[in-house]
Image (tube, rainbow, N blue to C red):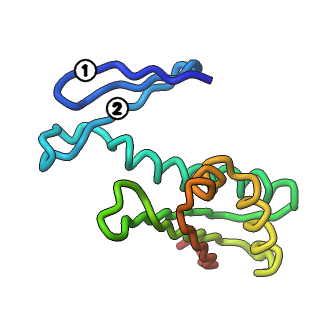
Amino acid sequence: MKATTTWTEGFASTITDNRGHEIITDIPKEKEGTNTGASAFELLLMSYSGCVHTIFNMVAKKMRIEFTALEVDATGSQKDEAPTFTDVEIELRIDSEVSDEKIDKCLQQTLKTCPVGILFHQAGVNTTYKIEKFQKA
């Protein structure tokens, strides 16, 4: 696995991986950027949300949990002007007929194996989780 970052202009850059994907990063206008992409710091939180979503989906498939919608929000905060996240709340919303207990078991297995979540945990970030069932309109 490899990532390469190339400056484009101002504070913007293009990050590519060794599979041919690319993303643009930048900082907000109020910090003198052009806001052409998420910041690297924002990508951390986006990665956490994406990882929980992907791993939950994989575990759900193994557990034969069917769903018609799945959403994961990750909300990060920085207490006492910390330079990085001190707390993250993960909220998983799912439209499924499966029991709450089975969904909770799937989430617990997800949390044990989500590599991004493990990194956040090892960094000492306090993470809380919430599951909400909903019906997609």
CB-based contact (under 8 Å), mark 1 and mark 2: yes
- Front-most of residues 111 and 65: 111
Q: Amino acid at mark 2?
A: Ile
**Residue 121: x %, y % from top left:** 61, 58
Q: Give the residue pinned by disc 1.
A: 8
Residue that appears at 33% across and 35% down: 25
Residue 131 against residue 54 in the figure, above or below = below
- For the point 55% across and 53% down, the residue is 48
Write the residue at 24% across / 42% down: 27
Image coordinates for residue 66, horizontal then vertical, percent: 78, 63
* Residue where numbered disc 2 is placed: 24
Is 83 or 129 nearer to us in this picture? 83
Q: State the image quarter where residue 60 is shown.
A: bottom right
Q: Quadrant of residue 69?
A: bottom right
Q: Position of residue 39 (x, y in %)?
A: 33, 43
Given the image, on which type of amino acid does mark 1 rest? Thr
Is 47 on the left or on the right of 98, as rendered?
left
Q: Where is residue 52 drawn, in percent x and y? A: 63, 56
Q: Is residue 9 above or below residue 74?
A: above
